[in-house]
Image (tube, rainbow, N blue to C red):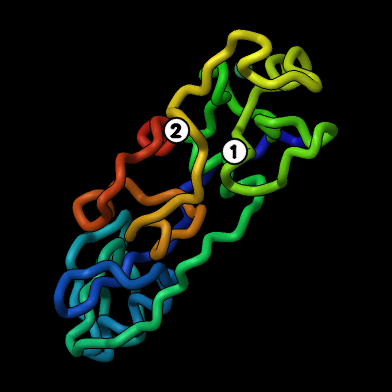
Amino acid sequence: MPDIRPTVGSGALVLNVTYEPLCVVSVRRAAILVLSGKAALVTDGDGILHSARDEIPVPSVIRLTRYVRVPYRTHVGLSRRAIFARDGWRCAYCRGPAQTIDHVFPRSRGGLHAWENVVAACAKCNHTKGDKTPAELGWRLHGGAPAAPKGQAWRVLGHRLPDPRWADWLDIPLPETAAAAA
Ligand SMILES: [Zn+2]
């Protein structure tokens, strides 16, 4: 299985008039919103964007000039990448780099493929664990019982890795890997 590395996307975080984070859009889309007066630049990214008449800093965070009501997605899909993101790209058993997904209560014994029964794991722990439960091996789960991710940041980002410049606006700790990539 290929290793999935988190990457910081070149998007811009969009804030409502109330400074509540709404979504992530492409840098190009964010620039159009700023140039058309629909949003104001809050935090600059790296570099300058040139248009026919204007030039503006690459937007990293923008704030809409009019209030927008948005229906929120409440369910976070269960994917390999989302599980890695929830678990900070670390093995739930030894904290080594995550390489695979482990079913805490083994699937071969009826364990479900659900947020509450999956964790990121390294290949070694996953192999050693086999068809046993953590209790049978005397292992413990770092971070306690797994659960579906909740909160504002997941609503806005899904499993997308946040740009460190967005940290002021999102109530989440940045993964170590995000800080390293910045
Ligand atoms: Zn491990």
Above or below, comparing residue 94 to residue 165 in the picture: above
| Quarter of the image with the N terminus in it | top right
Above or below, comparing residue 139 to residue 28 in the picture: above
Numbered circle sitting on residue 177: 2
Q: Nearer the viewer, residue 125 or 30?
A: 125
The answer to the question of whether label 2 and label 1 lie on touching residues, with beta carbons closer than 8 A, is yes
Q: CA distance from mark 2 to mark 1?
A: 9 Å
Q: Residues within 10 Å of mark 1 (few under 14, many from 20)?
A: few
Counting the numbered discs, the total is 2
Q: Which residue is mark 1?
A: 5
Give the residue displayed 36% in from the left and 35% down from the top.
Answer: 179
Residue 152: percent from left, percent from top? 33, 60
Give the residue displayed 42% in from the left and 57% down from the top.
Answer: 154
Q: Residues within 10 Å of mark 2 (few under 14, many from 20)?
A: some
- SS class of the residue under badge 2? helix
Residue 34: percent from left, percent from top? 26, 81
Q: From this viewpoint, is residue 102 visible? A: no
Q: Can you tell me whether the CB of the residue at mark 2 lies under 8 Å from the nearest atom of ligand 1? A: no
Q: Nearer the viewer, residue 117 or 49?
A: 117
Give the image quarter of residue 128. Answer: top right
Above or below, comparing residue 154 to residue 36 in the picture: above
First reached walking from the N terminus: tag 2 or tag 1: 1
Give the residue displayed 30% in from the left and 40% down from the top.
Answer: 173
Residue 49: percent from left, percent from top? 34, 70
Give the image quarter of residue 109. Answer: top right
**Mark 1 residue type:** Arg
